[in-house]
Amino acid sequence: MKGWAGNREHRYYFFLNKYDDIAFTRCPKCNRETRKRMFCLFIHIEPKQLISFNKSCRFCPDCGLIIVKKKELENYLVAMCEKHNPDIIGNDYVVLGTIDRDLHQKGKQGKLNINTAIDCFIPFIDHLTFEVHGGWQPKGK
Ligand SMILES: [Zn+2]
């Protein structure tokens, strides 16, 4: 999978938030407030399914960090796979990067060649993980 990245532009970091009750309204890296922003996420599901979808994410513009709740993401994945590909639900997946809105639209219309998608998506610089210790956290914010 690494080879796909080539030497194209890398733009964002990605954090898959495993905490249901913590929204990271503040960036875990710099502690500034995060914003909501739409991103077209590009995802690989084992064994060989690639999908993209448009999702509202938490975003820190200073760090270029996209934060997505794991549970929300997986609910989307289930909803998308239920119709066309129920066999792959529960398989391993990787959020590879983001994809341009035009390409995402083309994909939705079935007009996107898979090789074009692989050539054009923007891989994350890195996947980051942040652990929250202790229970003194604002809930649901
Ligand atoms: Zn930040």
Image: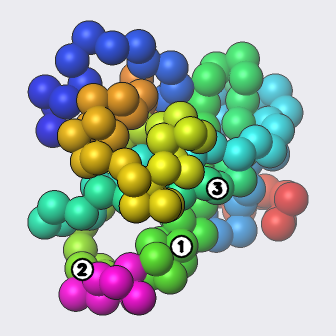
Q: Please indicate whether residue 42 sits to the left or right of residue 39 in the image.
A: left
Disc 1 vs disc 3: Cβ atoms closer than 8 Å?
Answer: yes
| Mark 1 or mark 2, earlier in chain | 1
Residue type at mark 3: give it. Answer: Lys
Element marked by disc 2: helix
Ligand 1's image quarter is top right
* Residue 76: image tag: 1
Residue 17, position as x, y percentages in the image: 55, 55
* Residue 88: image tag: 2
Q: CB of residue at label 3: within 8 Å of ligand 1?
A: no
Disc 1 vs disc 2: Cβ atoms closer than 8 Å?
Answer: no
Q: Residue at x 33, y 14 (%)?
A: 8
Residue type at mark 2: give it. Answer: Ile
The CA span between labels 3 and 2 is 21 Å
- Where does the magenta region start and end? 81-87
Q: Which residue is mark 3?
A: 55
Q: Is residue 124 visible?
A: yes
Image quarter hosting the N terminus: top left
Magenta stretch: includes residue 7: no
Q: Please indicate whether residue 35 sits to the left or right of residue 126 in the image.
A: right
- Which of the 4 image quarters holds residue 58? top right
Q: Residue at x 39, y 33 (%)?
A: 121
Q: Residue at x 48, y 41 (%)?
A: 103
Residue 94, position as x, y percentages in the image: 31, 52
